[in-house]
Amino acid sequence: MKPDKLVTVVAQQKLIIIGLLLILIGNGFQFTFLKVQIDAVVANIGALFLFVGTIEWVFDETARRELVYELFRSIRGDDRLHRNGLIDCVINSREVIEEEEWIKAKTLVIGIHYSPRFVEDNIDLIKERTKNKRRTVICYVGVSTAASEYLKNSASGLSDIDASITKLKSLVQTQFSGSHYVELIEHDRVLRYMFIYTESSIWIKFFTNAKGHAIVPAMRIRAATPLFDFFKNDIRNIGVGGLK
C-alpha cells in the first residue's frame, strides 16, 4: 500500500475507533452539568466520528475506484487513437487545406470519383510542385467502367459524371501538358472514401450512403501507424505505384 493511502486508511480507522470508544463511554455513565447531559453529548460526538470515518472509507473504496476506472478508460481511449494514427478531424471536409505539406511532399496522390474541384482549387500549388519536380497523381473513376455506371444509376452525386471527367482531363492537359510530374490514373472502383495522400499523412474524406448533398467529415492520419499503412496499401491496390 502506498504511504499516502496508508495515512488515509489509518486516519479513517482512528476516527472509527474513537467514535466507537466515545459511544461506549457515553453509554457507560450518566452526568448532567448545567442541564446538559454530558453522557449524551459524548455519545453523539462518538456517533459523528464513527459516521464520518465510515463514510470516508466507503468513498475511498468505491467512489475513488470508480473515478480511477473512468480516468483509465479515458486515457486508454486517447492512447488508442494516438497509437493507431488519428491526429486530426474536421466536420466539413472542404476545410481541409494543408498547402505547406502538399507543396513539400515528394508524392501527392488525390483519390476521387470524378470531381475536378481539387485540381481547380490547387492549380498554382500543383504548378509549384511540377516546377520542383515533385510527383502529383490524380486517381479518378473510368468513364466506361462498371463503377461509373453504378454511380450514374445510383444518382448518388450531383454532377454529370462524363462531363466532370472530361473537364478534369482537359484541365490537366491544358495546365500541365507535357509534364511527367502530373499523372492521371484511371481506376474502376466505387471508392469508399476520397483521400489526399502524402508520405507524412493521409486525409480521409468520407462519402454518404444516402443520396443528395451533405457536409461530410474528414480525418487525418499520420505516417508510420497502423491506420496509415492500411490506407496506403489500399491506395496501392487501386493502381498507384511508387508509394514508400
Image (cartoon, grey):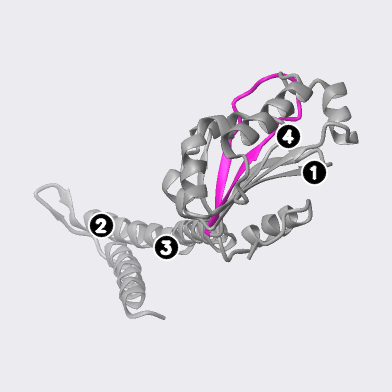
Front-lying residue, 28 or 44: 44
Considering the numbered disc 2 on the image, is that residue within a helix, a strand or a loop? Answer: helix
Q: Amino acid at mark 3?
A: Asp
Q: Distance between the Cα atoms at labels 1 and 3?
A: 61 Å
Disc 3/disc 2 C-alpha distance (Å): 23 Å
Disc 2 vs disc 1: Cβ atoms closer than 8 Å?
A: no
x and y, in percent, of residue 160 in the image: 75, 19
Question: Is disc 2 surrounded by few (<14), some (14 to 19) or many (20+) residues within 10 Å?
Answer: some
Question: Badges 4 and 2: C-beta atoms under 8 Å apart?
Answer: no
* Residue that mark 1 sits on: 187
Which comes before the other along the chain, label 3 or label 4?
A: 3
Left or right, 135 with reference to 234 = left
Task: Name which residue lies at 9% across and 49% down.
Answer: 34
Q: Which residues are magenta?
A: 200-221
Instruction: Give the CA distance from mark 4 to mark 2.
Output: 78 Å
Label 4: which secondary element = loop
Q: How many neighbours does mark 3 have within 10 angstroms: few (below 14), some (14-19), or many (20 or more)?
A: some
Point out residue 236 in the picture as x, y percentages from the top left corner: 74, 57
Image quarter in which the N terminus is found: bottom left
221, above or below 110, in the image: below
Of the residues shown, which amino acid type is indicated by label 4? His
Residue to which mark 3 is pinned: 60
Q: What is the C-alpha distance between the residues marked 2 and 1?
A: 82 Å
From the image, tell me which residue sits under label 2: 45
Mark nearer the viewer, 3 or 2? 3
Name which residue type carries label 2: Ile
Residue 218 colored in magenta in the image: yes
